[in-house]
Amino acid sequence: MQVDERMLEDLRRFNHKLARAPRFSYRHPIVPRLGQLLLRLSQLGADRKLRRQGIAVERLTAVADGMRVPVRVLRPPASPRGIVLDIHGGGWVIGNPEMNDALNAAVVRACRVTVVSVDYRLAPGASIGAMMDDCLAAARWLLEGGLAASAHLPVIVLGESAGGHLAAATLLRLKAWPSLLQRIAGAVLYYGVYDLAGSPSVRNAGRDTLVLDGPAMLPALRLLTPGLDDTQRRAPPLSPLYGDLAGMPPALMFTGGRDPLRDDTLQMAARWRHVADVELQDLPEAPHGVIHFPTAMGRAACAHAHAWINARLAARAPARQAPAGA
């Protein structure tokens, strides 16, 4: 992905606005609840907007080992070439599948895929272990043929921020079902959290961070994992960075120079490269959440991810037989 000076200047102007905006923080319990309420209100009519774009919307229940997990399915107008399993972000405390509608609709159009978004439970009502179980159950249901008409298609796992953490943890846990893991053609991981004891950039995050409240990040990880010490927090799959990555699919990873979670991705990419192809996009001056912001760099990152997904799906497409007599 090429980053030019015009793109950087555009991002710097936007970062200047972000510097004046409130940072996301867990310091006050009311903040996540208020954030979730406002998010829901902003999504009124979300299904109708997608249908106007020709994208079918369906709500299903993923079932695996007695667990039942809601999923939201976006289908392209034509027969899909693959499936994207989407795990949304939101710091484990806010978020839902609808929050990624704009991004997922763009993936549906650019890659002609069906997107399955996991509506996993959130903290503080659910533990992080319960969230991981929800994502694993949804993945198993999908890979075991939950979408019967698409059971033969390759799967891309996509996760952002907290969703990047849950996506990586899910991939690690799928090693218990090797045939299911082999169906995954690739992973797209946007600025995930892979060390729940706090990577160096998290531990050193100051008050000048953008989007995320730097000084609150390490305490938030500890609130998320009550009763554990740092050694226990680093145990995989809770901290995917320290897991056995053998068998992982090829991956595209994004991080940014202004993201306090940058070291999580840099360290994960370095380890993942020992077992599979990894393309690392370390975007200069990019903040956390860059793909959601109206900047040239955010748009370019999304377009690059679409091209990468298309390449992975093409690599998994069955070879065409030559016509008889050719």
Image: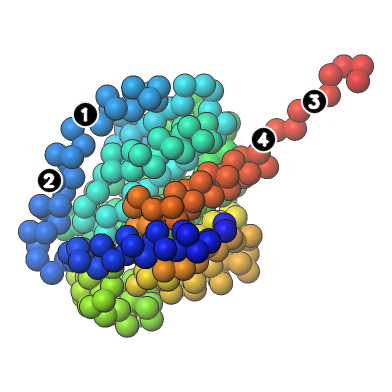
Q: Could you tell me the amino acid type at mark 4?
A: Ala
Instruction: Count all numbered tags in the image, as a single digit.
Output: 4
The residue tagged 4 is 317
Numbered tag placed on residue 37 in the rendering:
2
Which residue type does callout 2 highlight?
A: Leu
| Marks 3 and 2, the one that precedes in the sequence | 2
Left or right: 71, with 307 as reference point: left
Among the two numbered marks 1 and 2 on one chain, the one whose residue lies closer to the N terminus: 2
- The circle on residue 105 is none
Which amino acid type is shown beneath numbered disc 1? Answer: Gly
Task: Determine which of the numbered discs, if any, sits on residue 45 in the image.
Answer: 1
Q: Which numbered mark, 4 or 2, is in the foreground of this view?
A: 2
Q: Which residue is mark 3?
A: 321
Q: Is residue 245 visible?
A: no
Query: Dot 2: what SS?
Result: helix
Query: What x and y, as percent, mark residue 76?
Result: 46, 26
Which of discs 4 and 1 lies nearer the camera? The answer is: 1
Image: 201 above or below 248 = below
Q: Nearer the viewer, residue 65 or 280?
A: 280
Disc 4 versus disc 2: distance between alpha carbons? 42 Å
